Amino acid sequence: MNKRILVLNGPNLNLLGERQKDLYGEITLDDVNNRCMDLAKEFGLEVRFEQSNHEGVLIDLIHEARKYAHGIIINPGGYTHTSVAILDALNAFIGVVLEVHVSNVYRRKEFRHKSYVSLRADGVMAGFGVDGYELALRRMASLLV
C-alpha cells in the first residue's frame, strides 16, 4: 500500500507565480503540484494537494487527513505566525508533519520569525524557493520507509 501524503497550502499561495515574484519566483502552485506528483511516483507515494485562504477549511482538511494520511507537508502562509488553531489541529494528527516556506522567513520582518506550526513540525524547509516542497517530499519519503 502506498503511503498517503497531504500537501496543504494556506492563504495567498494560490497566487504563486503572480505576486511578489522577486520573493516567491515565477513558478505557480500548479507547477509545484505537478513537480511533486512526478517525484511522489518515484517514491511510491500518493499525494493529495489542497489550498485554502480560509483557516477553518485548512483545519478541516487536517482533521480529515487523520483518517487517511501518513504525513502532512504544510505551508501555512500567514497563518504560520498567528494560528494556534492550526497548531492544535496538527497536534491531533498522528503522523509526520513537515513545514515549508518558499522564502527565508528569518530574513524578513521579525514577526515572521515565530512559527506556531514549528512547535509540531518534524522538520522545516525555509528559503529554498519552491524546491522546498520537493525537499520536504524527499524527507517525508525517508521518514515513512
Image (cartoon, rainbow, N blue to C red):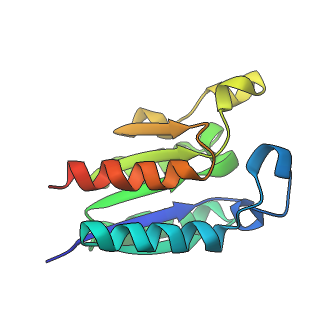
Task: Pick the quarter of the image with the N terminus.
Answer: bottom left
Judge whether 43 appears above or below 139 on screen: below
Q: Position of residue 82 (x, y in %)?
A: 65, 40
Q: Position of residue 80 (x, y in %)?
A: 60, 42
With 140 as the anchor, is 6 left or right in this view? right
With 90 as the anchor, is 30 left or right in this view? right
Q: Position of residue 9 (x, y in %)?
A: 58, 61
Please state which of residues 89 and 28 is positioned toward the viewer in this rendering: 28
Q: Residue at x 31, y 58 (%)?
A: 71
Q: Residue at x 53, y 36 (%)?
A: 116
Please state which of residues 131 and 123 is positioned toward the viewer in this rendering: 131
Residue 38: quadrant of the picture = bottom left
Judge whether 6 appears above or below 92 on screen: below
Q: Residue at x 46, y 55 (%)?
A: 134
Q: Is residue 53 visible?
A: yes
Q: Position of residue 104 (x, y in %)?
A: 65, 33
Q: Residue at x 39, y 40 (%)?
A: 121
Please state which of residues 121 and 142 is positioned toward the viewer in this rendering: 142
Residue 18: quadrant of the picture = bottom right
With 113 as the anchor, is 85 left or right in this view? left
Q: Is residue 94 visible?
A: no
With 78 as the anchor, is 92 left or right in this view? left
Task: Pick the quarter of the image with the C terminus.
Answer: bottom left
